[in-house]
Amino acid sequence: MPDAYSADVDQLTHNSKDLLALLSFAQELPGQYLDLRAPYVGWAGTEGGNNDFANSVGPQEKMDTDRMLAAVKGLAQAVTAAHAALVEQISDIQKPQFDALDNINQQASVNPGNVRR
């Protein structure tokens, strides 16, 4: 373990914005998939009718679609959790820094003649 710990808060903040972009992308995927799939719903082989092939493939296609949508929802939830954890980490890093600055400023206001410049 290193003797000193340091973190680039600016880089962490930038990374948190990247996670938000990924989250936005993950949230848009189900709608895009369903939009692309829409013209083929009811197409032979995807839903009922008197076609044996369609009757056998339809339930599997529905199950695959539901699984894909659940996977993307899970991805979005994971990205949301990662973003929340990163924001919390940034806050934990900045809090001691802000507290130290507040203490310095408070001490300077109490003893204005004893402040080094």
Image: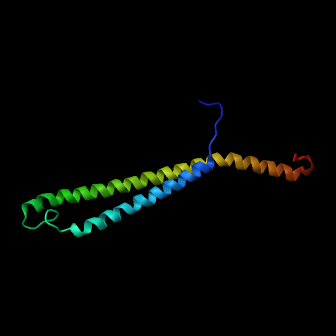
Q: Is residue 31 above or below residue 81?
A: below
Would residue 15 be found to the left or right of residue 49 on screen? right
**Quadrant assignment for the N terminus:** top right
Would residue 8 be found to the left or right of residue 43 on screen? right
Q: Where in the figure is residue 34, as x and y percent of width and height?
A: 30, 65
Residue sitting at 34 percent across and 65 percent down? Answer: 31
**In this figure, what is the number of numbered marks?**
0
Q: Where in the figure is residue 89, as x and y percent of width and height?
A: 58, 47
Q: Where in the figure is residue 44, as x and y percent of width and height?
A: 13, 65
Residue sitting at 47 percent across and 51 percent down? Answer: 81
The one of 35 and 1 positioned closer to us in this rendering = 35
The one of 14 and 89 positioned closer to us in this rendering = 14
Q: Where in the figure is residue 83, as x and y percent of width and height?
A: 51, 52
Residue sitting at 6 percent across and 66 percent down? Answer: 50
Q: Is residue 1 above or below residue 44?
A: above
Would residue 23 be found to the left or right of residue 48 on screen? right
Q: Is residue 53 above or below residue 99?
A: below
Q: Which color scheme is applied?
A: rainbow
Would residue 17 be found to the left or right of residue 44 on screen? right
**Which quadrant of the structure image shows residue 59?**
bottom left
Residue sitting at 43 percent across and 51 percent down? Answer: 78
